[in-house]
Image (cartoon, grey):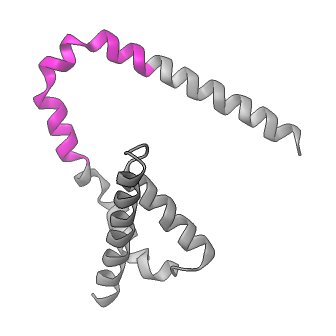
Amino acid sequence: MKDGLKGILIILAYLTVGNGISILIGHFLPGNVIGMILLFISLQTGLVKEQSVEAVSTFLTKNMTILFLPPSIGLIASYKILGDNIITIILAIVVSTMLVLAVVGKLQDKIGKND
């Protein structure tokens, strides 16, 4: 239990710092993304030991479906708005997916040529 509490506090601290940085930079990136990047860097550099957050991160990963319930219910509650804009939404999904595939493909070509 003690390790779990320590892990939760570490993760929440990085989330809070990430949210603070996000506010300072005008919400260019979401605070949770910044917090995850900072936590990743801290884990890679040894500032935070993997054992400190392992139990909590394993629990959160195994129960991720629970974390998606509120957004899913929000989508269901907004079915009218989604229905009115379905063509725009599908177009945005297709275009953004194609752009991501093209950029990743080009980057992979460049990285692969350096080997």
Choose between 36 and 63: the one closer to the eye. 36
Taking the spot 35% from the left edge, 60% from the top edge, the residue there is 20
The x, y position of residue 100, in whole percent, is 57, 29
Q: Quadrant of residue 73?
A: top left
Magenta segment, principal secondary structure? helix
Q: Residue 91, percent across and down? A: 40, 13
Vertical placement of 66 versus 79: above or below? Answer: below
Q: Which residues are magenta?
A: 68-93
Which residue is rendered at x = 43% and y = 75% of the image?
A: 54
Q: In this picture, is 6 found above or below 79?
A: below
Residue at position x 51%, y 79% in the image: 48
Residue 12 is one of the magenta-drawn residues: no
Which quadrant is the N terminus positioned in? Answer: bottom left
Q: Position of residue 89 (x, y in %)?
A: 33, 18
Query: Could you say where residue 62 lies in the image, as x and y percent from the top left?
Result: 34, 61
Q: Residue at x 53, y 65 (%)?
A: 40
